[in-house]
């Protein structure tokens, strides 16, 4: 206790940990904070052990690095509200120059979804513990390994289903998927469970991010060569099911990262060239 009668930071964390165990009987309790708190949590966990709580072994600290150079129009001190507003504003400005944007029912919602995806992927691409320099320009690139690319890939694949789904989903033969592009996608899809397990073990979302980006690049290549229109029905159906599987895995992976997949392609000139 302090001289003024207030409790120490460590004291409150000890009490909170004990209370959570009593309430939830957790299997694992994970603290996610900046890496400056590493020593603090080492001490808290050690004190819990000294106090006789064996479950202290099930407490883990997952530290993250510092984001450098993030500024908004309001100045150097950055608040989450400012960042979210800036994301939407910048994305709306990018979309304003694209003709198809006016076709959207809710461009603000689209801008928010794409912008948040851009921010999350930028943050999760590397080791959580690593510091990195923030760049608004890099975040909103539509080409390359960005959240914008993931959103547009998902939207494009959803568009394929909407366009061809009624005619081909019931007539297909998966044995038709012999092309190298198809095989590469199928092999990559098989790795999804492995990647999820790896991320669950080391608490690093970058494995999922890397997997989804590679999947999106494979889909972009396949989209140029695996035609659905004017192909024999069983071939077209097989290819459509392949792209549907890609979209499903992509959507599930994005949701695990906290991203809401976008279904309407607001703007993405040259999508198939994003490789």
Image (cartoon, helix red, strand yellow):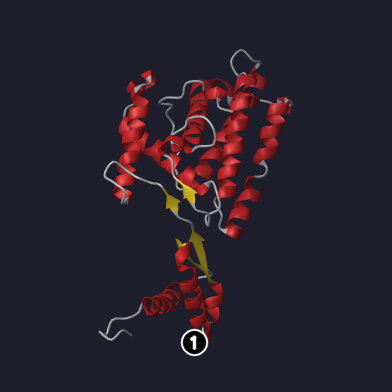
Is 123 drawn above or below residue 213 in the view shown? below
Q: Which residue is mark 1?
A: 51
Is 229 on the left-hand or right-hand side of 99?
Answer: right
Number of other residues with Cα within 10 Å of mark 1, as a class: few under 14, some 14 to 19, many 20 or more: few
Residue 245 location in percent, x, y? 59, 35
Is 194 drawn above or below residue 177 in the view shown? below
The residue located at (62%, 26%) in the rendering is 221
Residue 13 location in percent, x, y? 40, 75
The residue located at (43%, 26%) in the rendering is 265
The residue located at (51%, 48%) in the rendering is 124
Is 68 drawn above or below residue 47 in the view shown? above
Give residue 181's quadrant in the image.
top right
Instruction: Say what secondary structure mark 1 lies in.
Output: loop
Residue 54 location in percent, x, y? 55, 81
149 or 266, nearer to the observer: 149
Quadrant holding the C terminus: top right
Give residue 107's quadrant in the image.
top left
234 or 263, nearer to the observer: 263
């Amino acid at each position: 206790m302090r001289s003024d009668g207030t409790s120490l930071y460590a004291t409150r964390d000890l009490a909170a940990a004990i209370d959570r165990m009593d309430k939830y009987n957790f299997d694992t309790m994970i603290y996610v904070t900046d890496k400056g708190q590493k020593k603090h949590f080492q001490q808290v966990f050690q004190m819990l052990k000294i106090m006789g709580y064996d479950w202290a072994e099930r407490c883990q600290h997952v530290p993250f690095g510092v984001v450098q150079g993030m500024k908004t129009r309001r100045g150097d001190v950055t608040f989450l509200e400012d960042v979210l507003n800036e994301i939407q504003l910048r994305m709306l400005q990018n979309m304003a120059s694209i003709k198809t944007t006016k076709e959207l029912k809710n461009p603000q919602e689209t801008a928010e979804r794409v912008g948040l995806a851009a921010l999350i992927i930028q943050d999760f691409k590397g080791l959580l513990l690593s510091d990195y320099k923030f760049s608004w320009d890099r975040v909103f690139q539509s080409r390359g390994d960005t959240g914008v690319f993931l959103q547009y890939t998902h939207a494009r694949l959803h568009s394929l289903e909407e366009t061809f789904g009624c005619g081909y989903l019931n007539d297909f033969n998966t044995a038709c998927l012999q092309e190298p592009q198809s095989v590469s996608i199928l092999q990559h899809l098989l790795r999804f469970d492995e990647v999820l397990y790896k991320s669950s073990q080391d608490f690093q979302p970058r494995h999922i991010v890397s997997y989804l980006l590679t999947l999106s690049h494979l889909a972009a290549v396949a989209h140029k060569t695996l035609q659905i229109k004017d192909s024999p029905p069983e071939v077209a159906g097989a290819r459509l099911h392949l792209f549907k599987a890609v979209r499903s895995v992509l959507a599930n992976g994005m949701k695990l990262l906290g991203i809401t997949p976008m279904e309407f392609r607001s703007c993405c000139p040259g999508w198939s060239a994003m490789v």
